[in-house]
């Protein structure tokens, strides 16, 4: 498990005494240890930059894993720097280092490339491991409930989707059903709110897949108070005697796509949206949608897949 990276604003001081290149602790000027974070061994740490007072050109980054008054337990030579001999009155600063920045950049790149719910859900843990957990909040909601806007929060950024429609059932003799449509969706849309407001969150239920020769059912709407309502996707048509499903489920609206039409004995895949994916078509019962994706159509003689339930992801910054 990654340790939590702590930080303090304007935490800087000087060494009270020199240290060798192999020292595992240092002592700062009397009374200044209180300026710095207080890590818990095995759980958290913070970074220090040691800089020579004479020229300001020598640098060593260390990790502080424990603090006792003005004495810090340290792990030397971090981020490609070398352990050095340091003198009394050399600078000791809690800085935002290249390692901190690179960790944030890698998180941002992962989100940009993958852009999926698992990445969104990982944000709180990732931010906490960078020591930023207190500045960012996120809640992923998959069942209907209420959400209370936190104190001092006036802006929410919400990603959400309506539920996906169910796939149509395949006909009993060589004709497959079409896929259900994806639910409407939004991604990190901004909403102005008032602290303490209680918002009713309704999560749409995925439409059931159609039984053999029966159309899939539409997905339910997802809503957050009076801020928005996102329609569910339509159910896919079934295979019928002499033909595959001749019409896929319609998309729920913005940010979503329709399911695929069936073609003779090839079932249609479910439609997706900004957060979820449609069910996979296969030579069996249709695959289920995920997070508002539509269910796939059923192969001949098989039921359609269920649409994915909706989801709401609420983020805020302090």
Image (cartoon, rainbow, N blue to C red):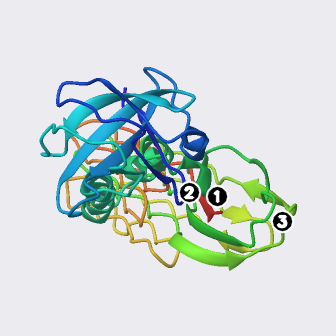
At 46% from the left and 49% from the top, the residue drawn is 127
Q: Which of the labelled discs sits on residue 220, or is there none?
A: 1
The image shows residue 51, relative to residue 6, as above or below, that is below
- Check disc 1 and report its element: helix, strand or loop: loop
**Mark 3 and mark 1 in contact (Cβ < 8 Å)?**
no
Q: Which of the labelled discs sits on residue 275, or is there none?
A: none
Which quadrant of the figure has residue 259? bottom left
Q: CA distance from mark 3 to mark 2?
A: 29 Å
Which quadrant is the C terminus positioned in?
bottom right
Badge 2 density bin: few <14, some 14–19, many ≥20, Cα 10 Å? many
What residue did someone put label 2 on? 163
Left or right? Give the position of 29 relative to 54. right
At 87% from the left and 63% from the top, the residue drawn is 197
Which quadrant of the figure has residue 110? bottom left
At 59% from the left and 69% from the top, the residue drawn is 157
Tell which circle, 1 or 3, labels the residue nearer the N-terminal end. 3
Which quadrant of the figure has residue 278? bottom left
**Mark 2 and mark 3 in contact (Cβ < 8 Å)?**
no
**Mark 1 and mark 2 in contact (Cβ < 8 Å)?**
yes
Q: Which of the labelled discs sits on residue 195, or is there none?
A: 3
Residue 285 visible in rendering: yes
Tell which circle, 3 or 2, labels the residue nearer the N-terminal end. 2
- Along the line of sight, the residue nearer the viewer: 177 or 141: 141
At 43% from the left and 39% from the top, the residue drawn is 16
* Position of residue 270 measured from the top left corner of the image (x, y, whole percent): 36, 57
Q: CA distance from mark 1 to mark 3?
A: 29 Å
Q: CA distance from mark 2 to mark 1?
A: 5 Å
């Amino acid at each position: 498990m990654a340790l939590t990276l702590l930080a303090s604003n304007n935490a800087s001081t000087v060494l009270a005494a020199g240290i060798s290149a192999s020292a595992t602790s240092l002592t700062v000027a009397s009374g200044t240890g209180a300026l710095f974070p207080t890590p818990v061994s095995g759980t958290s740490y913070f970074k220090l930059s040691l800089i020579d007072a004479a020229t300001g050109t020598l640098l060593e980054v260390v990790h502080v894993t424990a603090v006792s008054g003005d004495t810090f337990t340290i792990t030397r030579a971090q981020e490609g720097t070398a352990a050095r001999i340091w003198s009394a009155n050399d600078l000791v600063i809690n800085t935002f280092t290249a390692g901190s920045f690179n960790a944030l950049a890698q998180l941002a790149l992962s989100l940009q490339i993958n852009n999926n719910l698992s990445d969104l859900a990982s944000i709180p843990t990732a931010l906490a491991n960078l020591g930023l957990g207190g500045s960012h909040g996120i809640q992923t909601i998959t069942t209907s409930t209420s959400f209370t806007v936190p104190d001092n929060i006036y802006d929410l950024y919400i990603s959400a989707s309506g539920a996906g429609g169910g796939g149509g059932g395949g006909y009993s003799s060589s004709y497959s059903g079409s896929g259900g449509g994806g639910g409407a969706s939004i991604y990190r849309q901004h909403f102005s709110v008032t602290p303490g407001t209680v918002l009713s969150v309704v999560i749409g239920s995925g439409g059931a897949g159609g039984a053999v020769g029966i159309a899939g059912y539409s997905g339910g709407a997802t809503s957050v108070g009076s801020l928005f309502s996102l329609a569910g996707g339509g159910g896919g048509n079934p295979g019928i005697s002499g033909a595959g499903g001749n019409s896929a489920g319609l998309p729920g609206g913005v940010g979503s796509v329709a399911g695929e039409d069936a073609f003779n004995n090839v079932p249609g895949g479910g439609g997706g949206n900004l957060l979820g994916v449609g069910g996979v078509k296969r030579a069996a019962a249709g695959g289920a949608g995920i997070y508002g994706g539509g269910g796939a159509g059923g192969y001949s003689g098989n039921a359609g897949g269920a649409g994915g339930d909706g989801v709401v992801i609420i983020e805020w910054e302090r």
